[in-house]
Image (cartoon, rainbow, N blue to C red):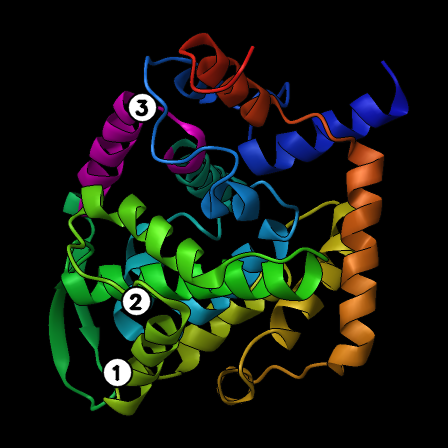
Amino acid sequence: MSLQDRLGTRFRRIITSSPDGVPPWLGAVAEGDDAGMYLPTDEPWQVHANFTTLVGGIRALLMQALHPGSLAGVEQHSRYETDALGRLAGTTRWLTIMTFGSRSAIAKEAARVNGMHSRVKGEYENAQGQHRAYKASDPDLLLWVHIAFTDSFLTTYELYSGNTVDADRYVGLWSQAVAPLGLAECPMTKDELHDALEKFDEQGLLRVDDTTLRVVRFIRRPPLSRTARFAYWFLFQGAVASMPAKYRHRLGLRSLPMWVVGPVTRTLLRLMRIAIGSHSPIEEAAHERLTRIGALPA
């Protein structure tokens, strides 16, 4: 096995929590007799296939922590402190199947996530000090998680990929992915996305407390190997620099200037792509399915 293959396997072990580095959901992407939601020419495929998702994922977690309801679900029901990589694998599974899978695979994955959401419920204290009951399937929580995710992946792609994308098409097309989770209405353009983020803030729905800061400290320093921690530090800096200043300040995060962070992050992502290689088992499985059903030329 070449050095590149070994590095690629090691990288996929981290993000899939699989001992051999083979995503357990690879078969789900390969199977099915339809094209799914997106083709390789569609914006969600282009954005989510890029290594900027590594930065966008960190940014999304930081943004989501600003909402006490979203934070309560993580704090009260997830295993983020004891099995951070397992939680990462679950998120990676959802992202890849919704982006690259067939309609039947998407339906199964949505059922899995909805089943998990049905068990995530409890109570949290909102920004006004009132106690509120919540369920993970509440439309306002689904919306916040979705817009924080969408804004993070789009922003980091625009900043660090070196490519361009039709932002409105990305936002509109990716909105289809949350419909199976029960979110009927969500932003359809980049401007609507930013308006939705501002609305949460203007309505006083966001807050930062000791729990928020504890989760942020964990996101800053997750349990990784020494080598992985070195790369992660730079990815974290890229995520923080890409956030609006007001949110960084609330979370107690300081950012290096973008004129420093931008080139460093772009260079790191390019080096990671070179070191790991362009081989993507998930994309290859999706391409093979699309070719088999005639959605792509043989």
Which disc, if any, is residue 239?
Answer: none
Labels in figure, total: 3
Report whether residue 61 is seen. no
Please state the extent of the stretch shown in magenta in the rendering: 98-117
Residue at disc 3, secondary structure = helix
**First along the sequence among labels 1 and 2:** 2
Mark 3 or mark 2, whichever is nearer to me: 3
Residue at position x 74%, y 79% from top?
Answer: 258
Mark 1 or mark 3, whichever is nearer to me: 3
Q: What residue type is disc 2 on? A: Trp
Near mark 3 (Cα within 10 A), the count class, few <14, some 14-19 or many ≥20, is many
Residue at position x 75%, y 47% from top?
Answer: 228
Near mark 2 (Cα within 10 A), the count class, few <14, some 14-19 or many ≥20, is many
Position in image of residue 139 (x %, y %): 16, 62
**First along the sequence among labels 3 and 2:** 3
Q: Nearer the viewer, residue 87 or 214?
A: 87
